[in-house]
């Protein structure tokens, strides 16, 4: 199941859902790769620990699309199967998540995120 989060508010909901589902979340940026079409791929190592002490360690790739130096879209992808065999709650489905038009909404609202 894919998840889609629209705009700045959607991105905030994404992080709230992760915070509710996991006791501890650590995201380490491993590498950035320039891609065609004003995009950058960010290779990330995620470590999460649940309230029941379940721990997962996995890699995700976020592809950020820029327009006028603002992120306008983020698409997340897993690099392989999840350690437990399925996507954990709060981290999207088979493909991950997508947050479209993040920068455009940011430009029209208060500064921040």
Image (cartoon, helix red, strand yellow):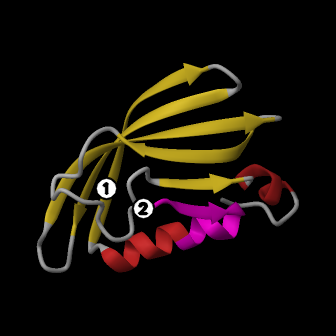
Which residue is more in the foreground, 6 or 53? 6
Q: Please state the horizontal and vertical placement of residue 62, each as a whole percent of the image.
A: 49, 41
Residue that badge 1 annotates = 26
Q: Is 7 left, or right, of 94 in this rendering?
A: right
- The residue singled out by tag 2 in the image is 92
Local SS, label 1: strand
Q: Is residue 100 above or below residue 42?
A: below
The answer to whether residue 28 is left or right of residue 13 is left
In the rendered view, would you say 38 is above or below 101? Answer: above
Residue drawn at point x = 48 percent, y = 75 percent: 16
**Circles 2 and 1: CB distance less than 8 Å?**
no
Point 38% across, 54% down: residue: 94
Q: Is residue 105 left or right of residue 84?
A: right
* 66 and 75: which is toward the camera: 75
Residue 60 falls in image quadrant: top left
Magenta part of the chain: 1-13
Give how far apart the Cα atoms at labels 2 and 1 are.
16 Å
């Amino acid at each position: 199941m894919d998840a889609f989060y629209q705009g700045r508010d959607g991105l905030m909901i994404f992080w709230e859902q992760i915070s509710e589902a996991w006791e501890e979340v650590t995201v380490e940026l491993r590498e950035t790769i320039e891609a065609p079409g004003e995009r950058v791929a960010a290779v990330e190592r995620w470590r999460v620990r649940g309230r029941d002490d379940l721990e997962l360690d996995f890699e995700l790739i976020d592809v950020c699309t820029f327009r006028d130096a603002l992120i306008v879209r983020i698409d997340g992808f897993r690099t392989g199967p999840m350690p437990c065999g399925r996507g954990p709650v709060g981290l999207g489905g088979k493909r991950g998540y997508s947050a479209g038009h993040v920068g455009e909404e940011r430009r029209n609202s208060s500064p921040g995120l």
